Amino acid sequence: MRCFGNATFTRILTLGLLFSGIFLIKSGCTHISRQGSPAVEPEVRAIWVSVLGTGLKSPEEIKQMVDAVRRAHMNTIIAQVRRRGAVYFKSELEPRGIPIQDRPDFDPLAVLLQEAHDTSGGKARIDVHAWFNVFKMASQKDLLEAYPAPISVTHPDWFTRKANGEVQTDLEPGLPEVQGHVIAVIEECLKQYDVDGINLDFIRYFGKEIGYHRVALDRFRRLTGRTDVPVPDDEEWSDFRRDQVTAFVRRCAVSVWTHRPDAFFTVDAVGFGRPPLVQFSDTSPYRTVFQDWAGWVRQGYVDIVCRMGYKREHVAVQAEHFREWADFSRKLQDESSGRLVTIGIGGYFNPHEAVLTQYREALKRELGTSLFSYHRPIKETTETQQYGFASPLWDALGQEIYPETVEPPRPRWRTQCAVLAGFLKDSSGTVVDGGEVVLAGTKQKATSDGSGFFAFVGLKPGTYRLQAPGTSADGLAVSCPAGKVSLIH
């Protein structure tokens, strides 16, 4: 068994539609419904809903927001549930966000799920992806007296540093404790709520000068044998920081798929500048914030990339870059065995007609979309401009862009593949950082991260024997069934 790319999948679909009648991930053609009538293929039609504006701060706002999404014939709400280390769901690990801190009985995520999943009276079911801001933080000065205590109180040592030692109030990706804590918060959400996906934002460094935490530097030196303090542009140091972000994405993906095999794992990808001229390593996302999101798609670490890359349609060079990034997204999706890449539309950058123009560019390429954001879906043009529920964009989208409702896709590519993962430790039980694990009889290798975690994704189902001399995993034979995560400890 193998994991098919979209082109191959389409050929198989053409042969099998009349017999299967199933919904498959968008591949550029229509499908036949179970009743035998033509229908629109499932695709991602997403919208980000931020806690900075209206949409999530009361049951009334949530109901209005879901109604607007249905009017637009969108099918996925990416709802912010963690911002600056504060959450918008029931948590024993982090404090509640300021806007809901004085309302302990109000659970925004629970109310949203109830409204979005309600299909009574023929209403369309809307997927809900819980959106977590990962490494981006702040001083949390408004949360100092909150319970649970914020990170700035319990672990100020988790904040990153500049090359000159200056503290930055963002979390350090190179600390295993930071990654473990964020994943624990995400798992807390997964265990309590019937979310359809987990969405990660700010999964990157915030410039080349960031990442000089003492522990991260010590890890870098131990792994490379160097003793210096590398300059921000040092290639080996850049690779190390990029590896920290990728390691977090990989571990988080496996966690999501373990707890909720049918849920999406999605990431918000930056689109600074222009797309790659030759390879993705030429781009600003890769080189300046160490976010290799194209690699994550190709390696099977994500189900969907919600590509941001917001561009102003009235600025010629930005409009050109928007289309070039869209072409790159289409090509990347075609190469990536069922994973999806959406076009991110920055509504707040563009007036009404320009937003619709960018949606039409997505339709031309048969790509899904993600709009930022519900609160400001279009650029302010007059003092009386209407936002949120009252915006005219919702009816325009539902009439001109998406005249029919469609189901969101499902991550079916993973049902054909297996995942093998675990934590690598030496004979004394100490975590192995940077250890190599090989699948015997294959050329496949994995490297453990700072917590000892390693993973093989997209495997052909079967039984594999691990080779990792000097560790607890060496010689283990692991059965890896399709569509499952086989996790060893």
Image (cartoon, rainbow, N blue to C red):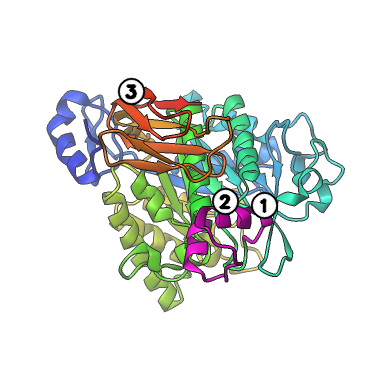
Residue furthest to the left:
15
Q: Write the residue at 46% across / 59% down.
A: 345
Provide the secondary structure element on which disc 3 rests.
loop
Q: Quadrant of residue 283 in the image?
A: bottom left
3D distance between C-alphas at marks 1 and 2: 8 Å
The tally of labels here is 3
Residue furthest to the right:
145
Question: Is there CB contact under 8 Å for labels 1 and 3?
Answer: no
Residue 187 as seen in the image, left or right of residue 141: left
Local crowd at mark 2 within 10 Å, few (<14), some, or many (≥20)? many
Query: Sequence-wise, which precedes: disc 1 or disc 3?
Result: 1
Label 3: which residue? Answer: 481
Tell me which segment is drawn in magenta: 211-240
3D distance between C-alphas at marks 1 and 3: 44 Å
| Residue type marked 1 | Gly
Q: Identify whether 192 is placed above or below 240.
A: above
Q: Nearer the viewer, residue 77 or 270?
A: 270
* Tag in front: 1 or 3: 3
| Residue type marked 3 | Pro
- Note whether residue 68 is visible: no
Q: Identify whether 332 is placed above or below 9.
A: below
Local crowd at mark 1 within 10 Å, few (<14), some, or many (≥20)? some
Query: Sequence-wise, which precedes: disc 3 or disc 2?
Result: 2
| Residue type marked 2 | Tyr
Label 2: which residue? Answer: 374
Provide the secondary structure element on which disc 1 rests.
loop
Q: Nearer the viewer, residue 133 or 113?
A: 133
Question: Is there CB contact under 8 Å for labels 1 and 2?
Answer: yes
Q: In the rendered image, which quarter contains the N terminus?
A: top left
Q: Identify whether 51 is placed above or below 281.
A: above
Q: Write the residue at 61% across / 67% down.
A: 229
Q: Write the residue at 32% across / 34% down.
A: 439
